[in-house]
Amino acid sequence: MDILNAIQIAYPNMTKAVKKVADFVLGEEDGHYFLHVTLNQLACDAGVGQASVMRMINACGYSSYRTFMADLSQVLYQGSASRKETDTLADDWGEILQLCQSGLDKEMLRLCAETLCHADFVICQGYGNSSHIASLAASHLRRTGLVAAQNIPGEISYSAEVFSPQRRAVVLSFSITGETAEIIRISKEYAENGVCVIALTGRTESSLAKLSNFTFFTPTRVAGRKYGRWLDGMVSQLFVVEALAGEVKKIKYAKEAEA
């Protein structure tokens, strides 16, 4: 059942305080709010105690705040505008860059950058060839002032200590095929625990794309050796990372200017 429908079905039997939480969730218009809000912050913003938030979540059939927020963000953001009905592959370098530029949704880029700026911790993860781009992405984001880390290939694991309910986290997952077993496994675990997952992949209908909150399309060539296609995908991923880092800088500079 759609989580929004679950809230509406349970609504008549909720107490006044619990209804305040439901009304707040259903009426929230901030596009990235649910991707980073903590239990305490949601309770404060709704004007109730944390117990009322948990009662609303329980009324919808959930026992975990993390799981509830993960499902809510999936419903709100999984059908992002960047996702295409079919994947498009390029024939040469010029077409790859053209596809990158034309397929980059500006509004989603801004929303993801806002989410990164609100995060207490950002982790970039890739496996095999994509680990190199994950490392570069972490370096780019560190230079913008964000705290970024990168998992080492072969040691990719979920860290419950790092992502506590009081800390807002974002994960950037890099996979050219979108079917890398290690990346899918760990990305799914983060998503199920309420962490925002941003995928950079050459297949927008891949397993990774389907479990992520946002998906950026990073095209590769049809022809050529496997190594060449992988290299194309890495360049596409780096293009998106540069765009994200640039948007983050714009947001940070704008906030500094206002201050």
Image (tube, grey):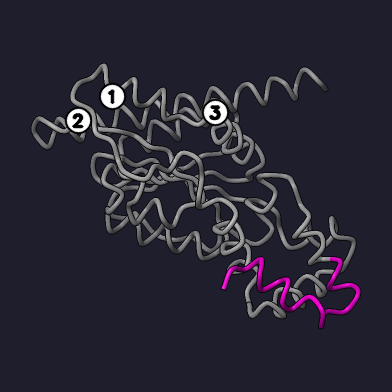
Q: How many marks?
A: 3
The correct choice, above or below, for 20 with respect to 96 in the image is: below
93 or 153: nearer the viewer: 93
Residue annotated with mark 3: 106
95 or 207: nearer the viewer: 95
Residue 184 included in the magenta stretch of the image = no
Residue 186 left/right relative to 91 = right
Q: Distance between the residues labelled 3 and 1?
A: 18 Å
The correct choice, above or below, for 37 with respect to 130 in the image is: below
Q: Residues within 10 Å of mark 2 (few under 14, many from 20)?
A: many
Q: Residue furthest left?
A: 225
Which of marks 1 and 2 precedes in the sequence? 1
The quarter of the picture where residue 50 lies is: bottom right
Q: Residue at x 66, y 26 (%)?
A: 251
Question: What amino acid is found at the position of numbered circle 1 in the picture?
Answer: Ile
The correct choice, above or below, for 146 with respect to 77 in the image is: above
155 or 14: nearer the viewer: 14
Q: Distance between the residues labelled 2 and 1?
A: 7 Å
Residue 10 left/right relative to 73 = right
Q: Which residue is drawn at 85% across and 60% down?
A: 46
Residue 41 left/right relative to 168 = right
Q: Residue at x 34, y 20 (%)?
A: 98
Residue 135 at x, y percent in the picture? 37, 36
The magenta-colored residue range is 1-20
Say whether marks 2 and 1 touch (CB < 8 Å).
yes
Question: What amino acid is found at the position of numbered circle 3 in the picture?
Answer: Lys
Q: Distance between the residues labelled 3 and 2?
A: 24 Å
Tag 1 secondary structure = helix
Question: What amino acid is found at the position of numbered circle 2 in the picture?
Answer: Arg
Residue 159 at x, y percent in the picture? 49, 60
Residue annotated with mark 2: 221
The quarter of the picture where residue 61 lies is: bottom right
